[in-house]
Amino acid sequence: SQTIHQWPATLVQPVGSPLSLECTVEGTSNPNLYWYRQAAGRGLQLLFYSVGIGQISSEVPQNLSASRPQDRQFILSSKKLLLSDSGFYLCAWSRGNSPLHFGNGTRLTVT
Amino acid sequence: DQQVKQNSPSLSVQEGRISILNCDYTNSMFDYFLWYKKYPAEGPTFLISISSIKDKNEDGRFTVFLNKSAKHLSLHIVPSQPGDSAVYFCAATGNFGNEKLTFGTGTRLTIIP
């Protein structure tokens, strides 16, 4: 069966510090990968999606970037965090016509 | 611009009764709709979906109704159970298979024993 791992579960970072969140998927190959964010009082907003290694599409202009160095690895990064980057970050995967499968998320607090 | 709206942030329902969660959308290009359920400290899990060619889809205690003319869908849970207490997200896409979903803000459902 397929599983998705996302870490860390919680993170507190000062403004201006870098960020790296990692997500890996097991049990499938060539998945579509996604990064979503839920800010307080808002729905889940799609940040990035990837259909293959090195292929990243950005949905909204922002202070973040994403990379896919391996087929089942998706990384969310920032060089300098802003207060507005605080939120709940979710990695997800899909393949073919399957619904999105989410990881357990990372709660990021920028102080 | 919130294209998928869940206007009720919270809902409390007695155990055994029917829970009705509502969702409205504005984008006429949406043709596939999904409901996700989320427990604290976990990611959302897929619950049920409906294509725009249907007006109803049922799976056990869960039924989703779609009213295309009103751009409205609803999730019915009957009978409601304590384990149904969670946040429910409505989501929509105009291109199923390329899962760029647009999500609502969620409704927190609390089932009262």
Image (tube, rainbow, N blue to C red):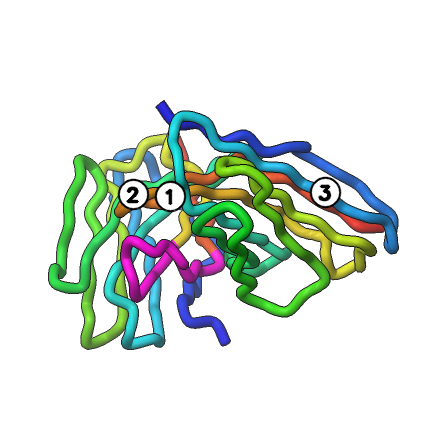
Q: Chain of mark 2?
A: A
Q: Is residue B97 left or right of residue B63?
A: right
Which residue is identified by label 1?
A94
| Residue drawn where x is 29% and y is 37% of the image | B80
Q: Say whether residue B40 is visible.
A: no
Q: Is residue B49 left or right of residue A65?
A: left
Q: Label 1 sits on what residue type?
A: Ser
Of B72 and A25, which appears nearest the observer? A25
Q: Are marks 2 and 3 on the same chain?
A: yes
Query: Magenta stretch mostly in which secondary structure?
Result: loop
- Where residue A9 sits, quadrant-wise, is top right
Quadrant into which the C terminus of chain B falls: top left
Q: Label 3 sits on what residue type?
A: Ser
SS at circle 3: strand
Mark 1 neighbour class, 10 Å CA radius: few under 14, some 14 to 19, many 20 or more: many
Which residue is identified by label 3?
A20
Task: Residue A83 in the image: state x and y as whole percent.
Answer: 79, 58
Task: Residue B46 in the image: state x and y as whole percent.
Answer: 34, 41
| Residue drawn where x is 56% and y is 63% of the image | A58
Q: Label 2 sits on what residue type?
A: Ser
Mark 2 neighbour class, 10 Å CA radius: few under 14, some 14 to 19, many 20 or more: few
Task: Residue A70 in the image: state x and y as whole percent.
Answer: 55, 37
Q: Do callouts 2 and 1 mark residues in contact (Cβ within 8 Å)?
A: yes
Stretch in magenta? B90-105
Q: Chain of mark 3?
A: A
